[in-house]
Amino acid sequence: MRQHSSLVVLIALVFVSALAPAQESVRTPTQLVRNEPGWFDQGGFGKQVTGVRDFDGDGFSDYAVAAPTYPTATAVGRVYIYSGRTGTILQTFDGSAPSAYFGRGLADVGDVDGDGTPDLAISSHGFDAPGGGANHGRIQCFSGASGAVLWTIDGTVGGGELGKFLKSSGPEVGIRSLVATHDGWSSAATIGSGRIVFIDAVAGAITGWASGQFVYGGLGWGGLASEPGISGIFAVDAQNRAHEIGGGIGGTGTSTLLLTPPVGGSGTIAAIDVLRGPTAGSSRLAVGWAGADSGGFTNNGTVDLYPIGNPTSVLTLSGPGTNRYFGGTLARARDVDGDGIEEVIVLMAGPSFVAPNVIQVYNQSGILVDEAEAAGASSSALASIDDVTGDGRGEWLNAIGTGATTRFDCSMFSLGLDTAIAVTATETTFTFSLDAGPLHGGETYFQSYGASGAAPGIVGPAPWPLIPLNYDALSDLAFTLAGTPILPNPFGVLSPSGTGTTTLMLPAATVAALTLGNVEITTAFIAAVAGSVTFASNPETLDF
């Protein structure tokens, strides 16, 4: 993020006469985490991300990010647990074998060892078992409290890649089961069929499996979908066919062919996930057909929502142009807009492979509710966690493990603050819409500004949420300008619905000076009761 050396520039250059328009920058994440070393030793940090339950007991959900080839010298892999509230590292887990791709699969299994802290299952689908052969695969469960290995399951087939995809299943609260792919496995009757295995997360043992139906079908090769508390387990095979999976003891599970790729384009299933449907007890399967053709475009891509048990789509979303590959990555979103219904997060390529990639969040009626730009579409991982900002709405995450810009990071996005800009010959006016949600109706709000960016932000005492703004000299200046025409209303009381409106007015000469100085101003607002912060909005960065 661009910085400037002295905030005196903000005032002194007001008298510059040249005029340049202000523009709103690319969406700024609420929280941003990175691995510590230089980019050359990031180890693919950001290749995988998943939401997990409360590991540190602060009342907020947390999340796990994988660096599967860290450090560069050995590439044994490392996984980090981050606080959803503050972005600090809570725990790290390390792989035990070089180049095994430790962290390819991540799954919260609950407190399997009974010590009061959730535990984490991690897979290494490239693990080579002793005695010869390659890519047998390995699944391990780690203590969330100590990082110690609780149990290990190794694949028994060279090239079997046990755990290439790993998901939790079972109850939303309490100890969960595991579902894993084993796409290189062969049944007695069908070579290369692949299978989905069911694992007891307490005992660390495979209890059953569902075999694939097709020779060299590689069931599970293309993906796996399962979520605790949501019905349905689904897998994609090596021919991009989607199957519904039923459990069973031993090898009595079932695999039922559900969907085949659409005609047109490459039609590939690139992503799959399950989410809660719009009515109580219902669930839906989200499928991204990244290479599908529609609306006169080629490879624009589509995303379909299917009610569980019904192969007829109830919603189709389409990419807006040729080669956008809409749906190449997707994930369940945990009610980002606060209407009580979950959404789907979708990635697509930028126009002509030049513009930044775009991530969009759609509700189940097909309405766009959030959007951000991201780099590294081919390596982006998406996930969602429950509310950590205090407004009752879920947050979503985008992890980037590489890309044209050599990025290795994980961003969290939330809502609350939106900006409209009006430019005249004499001034630029920023009008901010504040929305903390009805949970904070009637509470006091305060909006502040800074020139040092949003990350790592301000961490207050628990249970305060992270305030995505770095306090600096501009923040002090904003206090002195409160009530003036420049900042007429940076604090006040939110409406009964938790909303409000604020304004920043900058004279044209100030805008020109900020543009010349290559300055960014970041702003965010909080809601508070009796001096305690109850909500923190997303940051907005004004780019000049």
Image: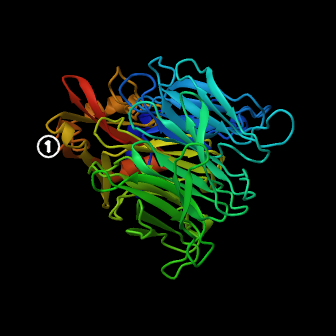
Instruction: Find the residue positioned furthest to the bottom.
Output: 296
Relative to 499, 414 lies left or right: right
**Rendered residue at 52%/48% (across/down):** 247
x and y percentages locating residue 94 in the rendered image? 67, 27
Residue 141 visible here: yes
Quarter of the rendering containing residue 156 = top right
Residue 513 visible here: no
Relative to 478, 512 lies left or right: right
**Rendered residue at 56%/66% (across/down):** 290
**Rendered residue at 61%/53% (across/down):** 376
Relative to 266, 464 lies left or right: left
Question: Which amino acid type is shown beneath numbered disc 1?
Answer: Ser
Observer-nearest residue: 489 or 481?
489
Relative to 221, 429 lies left or right: left
Identify the residue position indicated by label 1 in the image. Answer: 495
Observer-nearest residue: 441 or 276?
276
Quarter of the rendering containing residue 421 = bottom left
Location of residue 68 with respect to 246 vertically, above or below: above
* Total marks in image: 1
Secondary structure state at the residue bearing disc 1: loop
